[in-house]
Amino acid sequence: MALQTPKGMHDILPQDQVFWNRIKRQVKEIAEYYSFLRIDTPILERAELFERSLGETTDVVEKQMFVFKSKGKDRLVLRPEGTASIARAYIQHGLSHIAQPLKLYYEGPMFRYEQPQAGRFRQFHQAGFEMISHDDDPIYDAQVILACYRAIEGLKIKKLTIQINTIGCKNCRPAYRQKLQNYYKSRERHLCRDCRRRLTTNPLRLLDCQNKDCQDLKKDAPIMLDNLCGFCNSHFKAVLEYIEELKLPYNLNNHLVRGLDYYNRTVFEIFAEGFYSALAGGGRYDYLIELLGGRHSSAVGGAIGLERLIEVIKASNIIFPMKTKNKVFLIHIGNLAKKKSLTLIEELRNNNIDILESLGKDSLKAQLRSADKFKCPLALIFGQKEAFEESIIIRDLHYGTQETVPLKKMADVIKRKLK
């Protein structure tokens, strides 16, 4: 039996690279425009980082992490998300001393051991924007949401909507948790097995459950918006005012909580009309850096799922035109010409002339067919005679004309013909 990728992993084939390149370029352009700085963190992290930051009772930590022991007996994990790694790097490298707010962005593979399905893989890719500061100005929430929205919008994806909520802070959330527990305890027999377990450890996650019975129950559950302290109420109101000022489409979603314990106050997700899965999501995490051993710092971040973007792009028949350069095709005839072809290609590269070749083929007819297939305007014919005379034939494949020129003039003649 032929070997295949592990379950939930996928190859990115040449025909799909146009989507990946376009998305990565879009993220980079948006990040640089809004002054986010690139940061890259290791794919491997210590398991403790995510156990402490995401919460030991979250699905990610309980069920979905790829954890193993190194030869040195360290418990390591393939990173399941990017924010905790950014927080760790912020502390480790003393980035709090850089001018704040610090705006960072990243892009790369993440790993979760979950059941593969449409738009969901065990290895997947995210691009994220993070803002870390010494204050919790709500304008930072709006800036991160804006960056995520513009990155997606720039890919020609239409009819985007932001789902947004607040889940309060450590001052007002405990009372709300108690109200949720009281509400669900009298209905516990109708909950799924996971939600019965979460009722004690993490009751907010009951609002996130996709089980139909649990979804029906949450319709009448208490909402955080009615239980906010004054500071959280003012903060959320300001975030919404900034989003309205930007004229970004949004809906209040009182049941949106996100699946990770480090979030507080603002949480959001971005959807495209007609598609069930969120294309982006994130929120505020004012306690995470202190939890991991750093000084208290407020922060907000958002991540975009690249595979999900590609799924929407393909389903929407969005086409990204490929930028093609005028390339010339090098044809060799004979062993001596073939031997000298590599040096010839390097000379063309040094003159910024894009070249295609088929050095594995020796037939003139086969090489001309390749040149025609790639729609090259010029073919360079380099045979035994030309190799001895240090010349080359430049053939115009559109008009069928050709001329022989010395190799030392080759680059200038090609550039003139390509204008």
Image (cartoon, grey):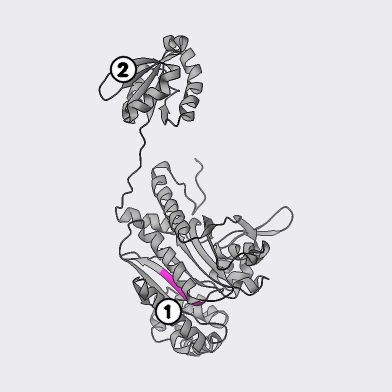
The residue carrying mark 2 is 402
Quarter of the figure with residue 325: top left
- Tag count in the figure? 2
Q: Residues within 10 Å of mark 1 (few under 14, many from 20)?
A: many
Quarter of the figure with residue 29: bottom left
Image location (x, y in percent) of residue 52: 63, 70
Circle nearer the N terminus (2, 1): 1
Image location (x, y in percent) of residue 200: 56, 83
- Can the viewer see residue 149? yes
- Work out whether residue 379 or residue 255 is closer to the camera in this orientation and state it: 379
Please provide the residue range marked out in magenta. Answer: 264-269
Image location (x, y in percent) of residue 250: 36, 73
Reply yes or no: does residue 377 show up in magenta: no
Residue 126: image tag: none
- Can the viewer see residue 193? no
- Work out whether residue 302 or residue 223 is closer to the camera in this orientation and state it: 302
Q: CA distance from mark 2 to mark 1?
A: 71 Å
Assign a secondary structure to mark 1: loop
Image location (x, y in percent) of residue 221: 43, 86
Q: Residues within 10 Å of mark 2 (few under 14, many from 20)?
A: some
In this rendering, the answer to whether 258 lies above or below 41 is below
Which image quadrant: the C terminus?
top left
The residue carrying mark 1 is 255
Residue at the image point whose x is 48% and y is 81% from the top: 235
Amino acid carrying mark 2 in the image: Gln
Left of 338 or right of it: where is 52?
right
Residue at the image point whose x is 41% and y is 29% from the top: 356
